[in-house]
Image: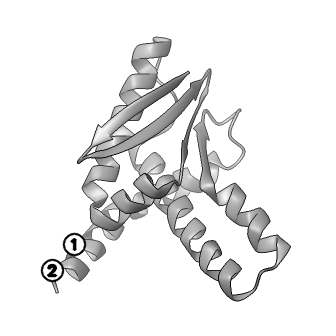
């Protein structure tokens, strides 16, 4: 089931399946990351709430873990797109395709959930660093 979210004029889509939800690092999401991490936080919160409303249960993905995963995928995708322009290797195309799709779910359905859960403590540091950089 697909849902649309409109945040600061950007239309973002999420897809829900039992125990899984996904976003795509499309132009709107990349633009949102560039403009405001707080909007990314709002999007992640709304997606988690919509999942809970649609399925009647909480998906076992922490908000900070979800935010860090979205940011990680978006930045990995941007780096891989840059590398594809410099070195048009098949491996960069393959990995950029995987980085573009952000799938989050319960641990038994999401093989890399442990990784994003482990990095979730970095969210406040990332937000603080970005705020300081934008203030300069």
Q: Quadrant where the N terminus lies?
A: top right
SS at mark 2 in the image:
helix
Q: Quadrant of residue 121?
A: bottom left
Q: CA distance from mark 1 to mark 2?
A: 6 Å
Q: Residue at x 82, y 79 (%)?
A: 89
Q: Dot 1 corresponds to which residue?
A: 131
Q: Quadrant of residue 130?
A: bottom left
SS at mark 1 in the image:
helix
Give coordinates of residue 11: x percent, y percent. Answer: 37, 42
Check the image and name the residue furthest to the right.
Answer: 90
Q: Residue at x 31, y 62 (%)?
A: 124
Please, which colouring scheme is shown? one colour
Mark 2 Cα shell of 10 Å, populated few (<14), some (14-19), many (≥20) = few
Check the image and name the residue furthest to the left.
Answer: 135
Determine which of the numbered discs, if any, sits on residue 80 in the image: none
Give coordinates of residue 2: x percent, y percent. Answer: 52, 26
Q: Is residue 74 left or right of residue 53?
A: right
Q: Is residue 35 left or right of residue 4?
A: left
Q: Is residue 46 left or right of residue 95?
A: left
Give coordinates of residue 37: x percent, y percent. Answer: 30, 59
Mark 1 Cα shell of 10 Å, populated few (<14), some (14-19), many (≥20) = few
Give coordinates of residue 107: x percent, y percent. Answer: 65, 36
Q: Quadrant of residue 111?
A: top right
Q: Quadrant where the C terminus lies?
A: bottom left
Viewer-proximal residue among 135 and 110? 135
Determine which of the numbered discs, if any, sits on residue 135 in the image: 2
Label 1 close to label 2 by CB (< 8 Å): yes
Q: Residue at x 36, y 26 (%)?
A: 49
Above/below status of 25 relative to 125: above
């Amino acid at each position: 089931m697909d849902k649309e979210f409109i945040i600061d004029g950007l239309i973002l889509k999420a897809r829900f399946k039992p125990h899984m939800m996904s976003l795509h690092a499309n132009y709107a999401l990349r633009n949102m990351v560039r403009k405001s991490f707080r909007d990314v936080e709002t999007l992640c919160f709304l997606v988690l709430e919509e999942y809970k409303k649609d399925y009647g249960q909480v998906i076992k993905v922490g908000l900070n873990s979800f935010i860090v995963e979205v940011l990680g995928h978006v930045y990995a995708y941007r780096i891989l797109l840059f590398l594809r322009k410099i070195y048009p290797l098949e491996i960069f195309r393959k990995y950029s395709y995987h980085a573009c799709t952000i799938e989050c779910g319960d641990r038994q359905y999401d093989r890399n959930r442990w990784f994003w859960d482990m990095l979730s403590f970095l969210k406040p540091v990332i937000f603080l660093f970005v705020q300081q950089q934008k203030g300069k």
